[in-house]
């Protein structure tokens, strides 16, 4: 394992993956000398990223086993919806330590929304027994397309005022103002991604990690898809992959969508569309969450419309499934109850070729309303502790120590 492949960050990856759990394992996996492995581990222990646990004995003295320490830092995660938000503190293994939810209108714009979220953080950290200096990063899930590299939302139909706004920088600024200094040298790292992507990432890791092609559909106020291929989120060229809510339906030319176009799937089968249809029938409804409440009560019109919405989405998914050939399709969101699932199955299996669905499991999500939070947190952890990023962070921490800064 020559060059950078033997860096401290790469040793950390071997430890986190369970490929090497002792110093001897690391020597064998990397070809490094005992002293070099010791120096690399010294960096990782010095950062507080590793811990020793008792090993098992095979007759001689047991070797100490090395593990990644998920308690050495925390992540702040936010799941932002159109009328509601959740924020949480999680450890690095994804355990939720504290959570808060409340009404928050995305239409109020990014400055007001991000400032409000930042005000939630200090009480959440206190509840979790964590300090601002324990925070290694913030993950933010949003209901719109995201340029992941830039940390900006791109032309989001249901997020007025957010297009091209510097979400990452504003979140860092609001965090510093309302919470204080984070663990990292410099501004706290902030990662922003689409909600369906992050829900797919979390659901895949939690229950379907052996599935190499995974698809999640979120049907709430809008409709979106998240795709995970070989364990990684597939975003497309500029973050627009999975935006199936804006696929045009041939027989709905008069259905006006929030994006300004006519005939989009979201204009016919989303929670927002069903709310409008129910209101027209004399059942006052304003959002996907209202539709969800009606479905829970068994309201007949809501049940019928949810099944019809599932059929329209199933019709589109026949093409998506044929193209991607996933092993698992997860349905989640406000609409994802039995009527909706029934409708999806009816049209999907009717329209798709039997071969493309022969090995497909169609299921509902397991993580419920915490999927977005858990996906956002996992994204931050996987980014910050990936080999190259870990090496950069270790170098920054070492520089801070040399200059006498607290770590």
Image (cartoon, rainbow, N blue to C red):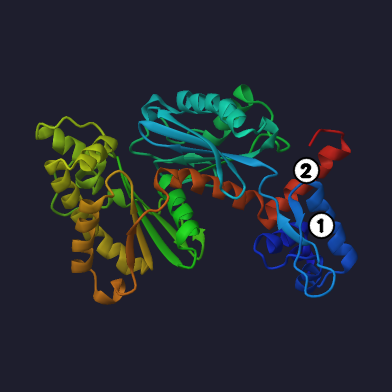
Please tell me whether mark 1 sits on a helix, a strand or a loop. Answer: helix
Compared to 196, does 347 lie above or below?
A: below
Position of 284 with respect to 247 (left or right) is left
Residue 235 image offset from top left, x and y in percent: 46, 54
Above or below, 220 relative to 329: above
Residue 249 visible at all:
yes
Residue drawn 18% across and 68% down? 350
Residue receiving disc 1: 41
Specify the farthest residue to the right.
Answer: 35
Q: Is 267 rendered above or below residue 356? A: above
Q: Position of residue 46 (x, y in %)?
A: 82, 47
What residue is shown with label 2? Answer: 396
User: Of callouts 2 and 1, which one flags the residue occurring earlier in the amino acid sequence?
Assistant: 1
Decide if residue 21 is on the left or right side of residue 158.
Answer: right
Q: Residue furthest left?
A: 281
In the rendered image, which quarter is residue 22 located in?
Answer: bottom right
Task: Check contact, mark 2 vs mark 1: CB within 8 A.
Answer: no
Q: Say how many tags the image has.
A: 2
């Amino acid at each position: 394992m020559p060059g950078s492949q033997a860096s401290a960050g790469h040793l950390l990856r071997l430890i986190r993956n369970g490929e090497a759990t002792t110093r001897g394992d690391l020597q064998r996996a990397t070809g490094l000398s005992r002293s070099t492995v010791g120096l690399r581990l010294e960096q990782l222990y010095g950062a507080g990223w590793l811990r020793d646990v008792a090993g098992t004995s095979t007759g001689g003295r047991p070797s100490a086993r090395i593990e990644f320490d998920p308690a050495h830092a925390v992540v702040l995660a936010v799941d932002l919806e159109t009328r509601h938000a959740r924020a949480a503190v999680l450890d690095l293994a994804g355990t939720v330590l504290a959570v808060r939810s409340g009404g928050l209108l995305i239409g109020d714009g990014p400055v007001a929304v991000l400032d409000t979220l930042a005000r939630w953080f200090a009480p959440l950290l206190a509840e979790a027994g964590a300090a601002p200096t324990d925070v290694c990063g913030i993950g933010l899930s949003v209901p719109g397309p995201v340029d992941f590299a830039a940390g900006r939302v791109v032309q989001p139909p249901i997020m007025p005022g957010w297009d091209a706004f510097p979400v990452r920088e504003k979140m860092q600024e609001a965090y510093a103002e309302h919470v204080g200094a984070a663990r990292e040298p410099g501004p706290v790292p902030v990662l922003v991604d689409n909600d369906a992507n992050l829900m797919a990432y979390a659901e895949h890791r939690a229950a379907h990690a052996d599935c190499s092609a995974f698809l999640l559909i979120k049907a709430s106020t809008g409709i979106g898809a998240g795709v995970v291929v070989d364990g990684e989120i597939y975003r497309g060229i500029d973050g627009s992959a999975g935006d199936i809510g804006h696929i045009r339906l041939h027989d709905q030319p008069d259905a006006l969508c929030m994006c300004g176009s006519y005939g989009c799937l979201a204009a016919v089968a989303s929670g927002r569309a069903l709310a409008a249809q129910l209101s027209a029938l004399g059942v006052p409804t304003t959002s996907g969450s209202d539709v969800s409440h009606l479905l829970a009560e068994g309201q007949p019109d809501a049940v019928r419309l949810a099944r019809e919405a599932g059929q329209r989405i199933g019709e589109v998914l026949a093409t998506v499934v044929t193209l991607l050939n996933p092993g698992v399709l997860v349905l989640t969101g406000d609409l994802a109850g039995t009527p909706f699932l029934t409708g999806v199955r009816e049209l999907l299996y009717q329209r798709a070729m039997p071969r493309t669905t022969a090995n497909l499991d169609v299921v509902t999500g397991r993580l419920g309303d915490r999927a977005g939070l858990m996906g956002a947190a996992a994204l931050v952890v996987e980014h910050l502790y990936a080999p190259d990023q870990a090496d950069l962070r270790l170098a920054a921490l070492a520089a801070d120590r040399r200059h006498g800064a607290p770590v």
